[in-house]
Amino acid sequence: MAGYVLRRFLGALPTLFLIVTLTFFMMHAAPGGPFDSNRRLPPEVEHNIKAAYNLDKPVYEQYLIYLDRLAHGDLGPSFKNKDFTVAQLIGIGLPVSATIGLSAMALAIFLGTLLGIWAALRQNHWQDYSVMTIAMIGITIPSFVTAPILSLIFGVYGISLFGHEFSLPVGGWNGGAFANMILPVTVLALLQIAVIARLVRGSMVEVLRANYIRTARAKGVPTSRIVFRHALRAAVLPLVSYLGPAVAGILTGSLIVEEIFGIPGIGRYFVQGALNRDYTLMMGVVICYATLIIALNFLADIVYALLDPRVRLT
Amino acid sequence: MTATGSTAGAETMELAQGVQGRSLWVDARRRLFRNRAAMASIIVLGLITLMAVLAPLLSAYAYDEINYDIVSCAPGWWPWAAPCSAGGSHWFGTDAVGRDLFVRVLYGARVSLAVGLVATLVSLLIGVLYGATAGYLGGRIDGLMMRVVDILYSLPFIFFVIILMVLFDRNFVLLFVAIGAVEWLTMARIVRGQTLSIKQKEFIEAARAGGVSSFSIIRRHIIPNVVGPVVVYVTLTVPGVILTESFLSFLGLGIQEPLTSWGVLISDGANEMETAPWMLIFPALFMAVTLFCFNFIGDGLRDALDPRDQ
């Protein structure tokens, strides 16, 4: 086990190196730079600014400087957000993005699994068809359509519940207040609920036909125990291997959701950084995301091995 | 299939004359035709494509014809808002600068479908060649090639596409290539898996014994036999690509004005949703229906080509 973890860790390093290299040269291959503006700066001022950020050196030298800094854990200063280092900006944005992303993931796993089990138990009945139709709709309607519609219904028109009028905030973060999180988390979770429900239904239908389930039934084990104790453990395996891509999907989705709801997460920093050619900020966010994806893929493999005794981590 | 046919003996040929033979493809087609959801989807998708192709003929308005007298007009038949005086002949109403929304939705369909098809073709080409090569050559080369795919899998690709689009000024062609280059990985894995099992078959051995070159074996004998799963995956890739494009357009990184795509239209519509809901509803409806169709066709093809679950 320890050997496996070590090997996975060492395997991740070349991947990260590749990501850093690719992103770096892609950015520098493009025309234009972070300090190009419509206003013409005097040449000596421009030269001084570039020199301060090492932009006057040849690209390979900048690359080596960047790698050297990175090896010391320094992501460098942000080109555009003066007075902030990239690490500080990520430190501000990441907790926000993580809160939303993890809440959405937890919600999606819980609801998606329940819906999937329900559909599988009522296979080819109306319950099955309605869950699968809703799931299909969830997959085909993109988040940037559901987001404005939901904010119109629940935010602008408001809802009336137990005689009280509620309306959810449709934007802003407000220090992570619960009310501010409801809409973004829901929008982010919808697609994943749909995918997970389909996945779990598929594997559950197959598992329920297995011999050991029939044996359990013959022995008179109550259905709830069969489903949640015996069948579910086998049926969630495809879900676990889906978690890696799902996390990537949530991260991508959060780019849109953060943009729509005005949430100060790192997704917004990335889009802004890209538009402003804030090289270091872009690099920092990409490295941060890549590390997350690699780490979570690794976690998914471990969970898989814990659930399925046939799998050995070697 | 041709290769297995040619190795069949003379007796089977004689037998086949008495009985009407049914190939895998005929069987698959029959099963597909019986799948009502898939057939309806094919028809609807065909209609949308036809409308997109014939867009200039279907509307009296040009897609970039701005008319500030009829800004954000409701369609003539819209019951909840009074149309402007000149709004009657705009079936889907007009947008925020008075352009006819119907023709813009169709032009958006052109771009979205084109991106979907071309990017999928790019991913198909790379994925099939890569996967078939890795699977056929096997051994250390296979291990190396698949290791590269594994590494690429853990890259946050959407970020690369965004970086590319920002840095190279929203180049239209690049959009196709960038999305295609993202989507080929799964294709390569599927094709490799299929190739590994096919290359054990006798007809491949026969071809090799006959002195056919590796490249020809891959091209003539292996690729035709992996078509089934590939076709299924292609129909499921197209909607994914359309979504990616619309997502980029939504962030303002996709198609540029006056050209449009469903993502751009939806993004514009979302801003005007409270006052002009038709600007969101129609493009979103077209896009959702199209994605629905592709998914149903994909599911139908999978059921048709993989008879195990029947």
Image (tube, coloured by chain):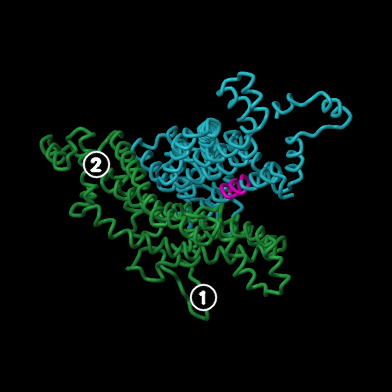
Up-down relation of residue A140 to residue B177 (above or below): below
Image coordinates for residue B56, horizontal then vertical, percent: 57, 34
What residue lies at 61% left-to-right and 23% top-to-bottom? Answer: B208
Which residue is nearer to you in this view: A10 or B55? A10
Up-down relation of residue A223 to residue A267 (above or below): below
Q: Is residue B291 magenta?
A: yes
Q: Which residue is mark 1?
A: A160
- Magenta part of the chain: B286-294
Chain colored cyan: B
Report the predominant secondary structure element of the magenta stretch. helix
Numbered circle sitting on residue A34: 2
Element marked by disc 2: loop
- Asked if marks 1 and 2 touch (Cβ < 8 Å), the reply is no
Give the position of the N terminus of chain B as an image quadrant: top right
Element marked by disc 1: strand
Image coordinates for residue A92, horizontal then vertical, percent: 28, 60
Which residue is nearer to you in this view: A251 or A5? A5
Chain letter belonging to callout 2: A
